Each structure stands twice: as C-alpha cells, then as structure tokens.
Image (cartoon, helix red, strand yellow):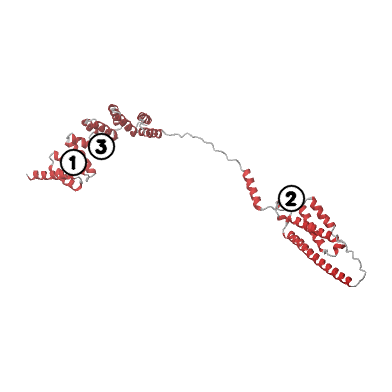
Amino acid sequence: MSVINRVLNDIEQRNEQEKSAQGYEPVQIKEPSSIGQWLVVLIVLVICFSGVSYWLMQQSENEEQASVAEVVVKQKKVPQDNIPNSDKPVVTQETKAIAEELVKNEKPSEAEDIRTPKVLGAEAKEVVSAVVQIHEKKPKEVVADLPIILEEKSNDIKARTNKEPVKQQKLSITPVKMSTTELAQLKLTQGLKAQKVGEIAKAQEHWQEALTLVPSLHDARVQLAASYFGENNVQKAIALLSYGNKKYETFDGYRLLAAQIYYQSNELDKALLTLSSPYLDSDASTENLTLAASIAQQLKRWPVAMANYQQLVNRQQNNPQWLLGLAIAQDAQQLTPKALQNYQQLLLFTRDQGIYNYAQQRISALQSELEQ
C-alpha cells in the first residue's frame, strides 16, 4: 500500500508541476520605441531565464524517474506471492481507476514533450500492470504460500481436536479369596495390633477367631493365655495352656508359659512339675532347661538341677552362668572332684569379680578336703 501511495504522490506532484508550468503566460513585452541597447539586455535575460528553467525541470524530472525506477525494481525483486496477507497492498476500485486513467493520459502534451521523457510512460505501465496483477491474485494462491510453521500448528490443533476422549478408568474392588490359614494369620495380626493400642478385649476376640479357624495356631493360644494372666485370671490361662499341652505335646511353649505363670504365683513345685523334666528331652528348648534348673536349685533338688545344668553345659561349655550352676549342684552333692574341675574352669571365663572370688574360695576349700 505504501508503494502505491508513493507512486501516486509522485505522479500528482508531477501533474501539479506541469499545470504550474503550463500556467505561465508568455511575457508581454512592449517593443520600445528604439531597438538599441534595451533589446540586447532583454534577449540576454530571456536566454538566462530559459536556461535556469530548463535546468530546474531536468533536475525535477531525474528525481521522479529515479523514484519510479526504484519502485519498479522493488516490485520485481519482492514476489507478491511471498508477501503475507497482512502486508500485501489492497487495491481498491478507486486506485485501479486512477491507474487506468494514468495509462490513458500516457501521451504527453506538447508542453510536456519538451521536458518529460517518453520512458516515463513505459514505467507507469509497468507500475499499473503490477498493481492490476496484485489485485487479480486469487486468495487460494496466497493461502497456499503461508509459512510451513502455521500449517504445522494448524495440523497440531486438528490432531488435538480429533483425539479420542480419554476413557476414565472406573475403580473396581475385586474381592480376594483367602485360605483358612491366611485368614487365621490375619486375625492373629489384628489381635496384636489391638493389643498395642490397649484394646485387650478386641484382641482376645481376634485370637479366639484365629483358633477357631486353625486350632494348631500356637502363637494365637499363647497370646490369649498371656492376656488372661495379665488380667489376673490364672485359672483360665492355665486351663487354656493345659489343653494345648495335652493336644500338642511336642510344643514347648505351653509348658514354659504355664511354668512361668506358676513361678510368678510362687508355686514352684507346680512350675517344676509342669516343665516335665526337660533334661530328659534332647530337643527341649534352652529356655525350658534354664527355668527348670533355676527352679530345682531354689527347691534344692540338686539332682534335677545338676541334670538340667549338665545339659546346658553340653550345649555351651564356656557359659559362666551354667558352669557356676553345675559346680554348685555337684558341690552340694559332695561330688568334690567334678565340682573342683568346674570351679577352676569358671575362673577362665567369668568376668564377674564376685563370682570369681566365690569360685576361688570354693577351690581352696575343696582342695583342703581332698588333702585331708
């Protein structure tokens, strides 16, 4: 649009200059009465005036030709198809009519012919032709020359709109089938959790459900009996453990817990009887043997205590506690050589100064007895 405006402005300026040039009327010169000196001066002035006027018109004409040529070159260099829609000149009917009028008036008048070259008409034709070509361009060709980036963006938008809606996944709860053993184990765990928060009654209910599902679930029976003992219900606890001990004789846990309940209740004989001489069982637990030996020592049942401690020393020969218990049980039964040997071995492994001093005293006493 700016290019056409410049061309039209140049043409309009040229027309105004031409009209102004044509508006000059010839100077009416009255002949002087005498043709002498004044005639010569007048001729010189006319020649000077004509020369200056011709030079000024040539300069103006050259500037107009240069501007028009620059416009034509720019039109040729810049392809109209590559001009974006927002920058392309818009040719109205009025502009087209003015261009056509310029073509019709291409032939200069006699007054213009003296100072306007004929090449200006050819350049005007080229400008008008370019304007008409721009006006006659089809919109489809302009759209086809849009940048590839816009096409890609358009394709992206179409792809997004054509995408299928994401199907929302529905939350489904599928029941999991559990075996009887797994369900019983779950009840045991629930009971332990309830016990931690102080809900003892709820914990007992879970453990009873677990035993109903799997009667051989020993951990549930032990936890339930311990909870009864915690409530000072000793009879209920012992009854539950006795039933378990009779039905599952190979399980040490029932005997051990029952003996501990009796021991806490200061019923040492029942506690030792419940343990059922564990030293006779090579598979008896270490806890069972230790408790039986300690109760027998307190009851001064030295043979039972010695049998249990001997079983423990056989499992771990360098344990100071078990060596001391065995030596004391042998010393009480006057088995001096065996007691002396265990006291001497105790000195090598104990770190307790009181036990060390006691062992030295007994060694001195037993050695004196042997000398006598």
Q: Earlier in the sequence, mark 1 or mark 2?
A: 2
**201 above or below 78?**
above
Q: Earlier in the sequence, mark 3 or mark 2?
A: 2
Question: Disc 1 to disc 2, how far (Cα)?
Answer: 114 Å
- Residue identifier under label 2: 139
Q: Amino acid at mark 3?
A: Asn
Q: Amino acid at mark 2?
A: Pro
Characterize the local packing of mark 3: few (<14), some (14-19) or many (20 or more) Cα atoms within 10 angstroms: many
- In-front residue for pair 352/347: 352
Q: Residue furthest left?
A: 372
Instruction: Give the image location of residue 160, x and y in percent.
Output: 62, 45
Instruction: Give the image location of residue 204, x and y in percent.
Output: 35, 29
Q: Earlier in the sequence, mark 3 or mark 1?
A: 3
**Is the C-beta separation of discs 3 and 1 under 8 Å?**
no
Question: Disc 3 to disc 1, how far (Cα)?
Answer: 16 Å
Say whether residue 181 is left or right of residue 334: right
- Residue identifier under label 1: 326
- Asked which quadrant contains residue 236, the reply is top left
Residue 343 shows in the view = yes
Question: Of discs 3 and 2, which sits in the foreground?
Answer: 2
Q: Residue at x 63, y 43 (%)?
A: 161
Q: Residue furthest front?
A: 33
The secondary structure type at the circle numbered 3 is helix
**150 above or below 22?**
above
Instruction: Give the image location of residue 312, x and y in percent.
Output: 22, 41
Residue 136 shows in the view = no
Say whether residue 241 is left or right of residue 95: left
Q: Which mark is residue 288?
A: 3
Question: Of discs 1 and 2, which sits in the foreground?
Answer: 2
Characterize the local packing of mark 1: few (<14), some (14-19) or many (20 or more) Cα atoms within 10 angstroms: many
The secondary structure type at the circle numbered 1 is helix
Instruction: Give the image location of residue 170, x and y in percent.
Output: 54, 36
